[in-house]
Image (cartoon, rainbow, N blue to C red):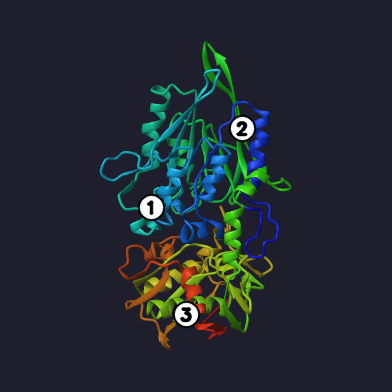
Amino acid sequence: MFPIHYANNHPNDVGLTKIATLITQERAKEAHVIVLDNGDLIQGTPLAYHHARLDNEPMNPMVLGLNYLKYDGAVLGNHEFNYGMDVLQKAVRESNFPWLCANIVNEETGEPFFGKPYLVKQFADGVRVGILGLTTPYIPNWEDPKHIVGLRFEDPIASARAWVPFLKEQEQVDVVVVSYHGGFERDIATGEPTEPLTGENQGYQLCMEVEGIDVLLTGHQHRSIAGAQINGVTIVQPGTAGVTLGKVDIVLEQVEGKWRIASKQSELLSVANVEPDEVLLTQISSYEAKTQLWLDQPIGKLTGDMLVKDPMEIRTEDNALIEFINKVQMELSGAQISNTALFDNVSPGFPSDITMRDIVSNYIYPNTLKVIRISGQDIKDALEQSAEYFELAENGELQVSKSFMEPKPAHYNYDMWEGISYTLNVSRPVGDRVVQLDYEGEPIKLEASFDVVMNNYRAAGGGNYAMFQNKPVVKDIPTDVAELLAGYIMERGTIEASVNHNWKVIWT
């Protein structure tokens, strides 16, 4: 919402208050404008977290922003469900615009769960534009089951095949726009798969297999895509966090008394150097003030060093920050083995005086914890998956592999472990990089069972960790990890940085 870095409150070219200015400018230029949100609206920042978890009585501040900007509609994203159905339903009720979800239906009735599958926008000159809302059906693989009780997530391809002809034939629309909270599973130019074809992202398939779509709005992958078409469908994806406004320009002309598309193109409008909307800043200033007070609450003290100076170094040898998070997870869950990740390269680590700001700047997702029972072979397979994070440049230097950088940076999918001892040699071929793996001083028994604590996203197999899917859940800890870390530090007052050097990455 605000154009700042929450880690330090420095200015940052992001956010809805800047997007608001661009929307106002576009409306001033054109009479026929439709504005849509493509999902993941109500989660993602400390402001959103504070509202959802600590002060949910006032109107949702993100919804307030969209109401102020008179959005025409919004589509549900996977992160809409993170805070549970009560928080989501409240946000939907407060919205002055419809939420569209053709393929998220009531389990019993089969009807769209959150209101409408589509909306039709008609302009004064008779042009009718139909907007169909679709959401990645992969949500049950990540989300806490109690957050999605009563919902069925249907195949977006099947839903589009049903609703696109309905829009054209029954609603008599001249333009069909599909707003899909999902991305592209294949290279948009060649059609080659760019990820395992799990059904998480089906944008390419929508363009190729569903007739009648004119424009496909996408998201979820945080990619910046514009100026492209797939099978004649104009596509766009506007990054993340409000760095750009995705714009699709459609020109229509009348042919034999009917409107026909003469041209269409997509582009991204950057918020860099754009002044934020002062009215919207004022409207959400009270939310921001409360968030900032909460962020600056002192929690405890640290002796030693847990700062992140070099993210690559953090990921190549055992370090105090990751060890601390893993040890907290182990202590609170009772598991003997744990894994976690350095989610982003901007994670700052912990200073000597720790505040809530430091917690949420490092643990940026509303994950909870699960203890699952897996085999030694599963652990080895997971380490091989993590080892794919690295590749060697031509000069022999270590770098992040393309598979973890494209289509978007996925640093959060590289795990580091505690409770086992291991060495990864990334000069070896992919799939054969675990050169040492011990448990309690002995080579791990691949057929043995182990209880391992990890976040709920990973425990469900998120991030291509299929070896964790459908494993027995020994314990479910439903509290957010950020809250667990904060409570752990507050209870002790002072924590100490420690490193036991149980793992390392080598490449020579």
Q: Residues within 10 Å of mark 2 (few under 14, many from 20)?
A: some
Q: Please say if 174 is above or below 504.
A: above
- The residue beneath circle 3 is 327
Determine the CA span between mark 2 and mark 1. Answer: 37 Å
Q: Position of residue 443 (x, y in %)?
A: 41, 84
Q: Give the SS element for disc 3.
A: helix
What residue is shown at x 36% (from left), y 38% (from top)? 158
- The residue beneath circle 2 is 265
Mark yes or no: residue 84 visible: yes
Determine the CA span between mark 2 and mark 3. Answer: 51 Å
Q: Give the SS element for disc 1.
A: helix
Q: Nearer the viewer, residue 21 or 158?
A: 21
Contact (CB < 8 A) between labels 2 and 3?
no
Mark yes or no: residue 45 visible: no
Q: Amino acid at mark 1?
A: Met
Q: Nearer the viewer, residue 342 or 445?
A: 342
- The residue beneath circle 1 is 85
Q: Earlier in the sequence, mark 2 or mark 3?
A: 2
Q: Earlier in the sequence, mark 2 or mark 1?
A: 1
Q: Give the SS element for disc 2.
A: strand
Q: Nearer the viewer, residue 158 or 379?
A: 158
Q: Please say if 396 is above or below 109.
A: below
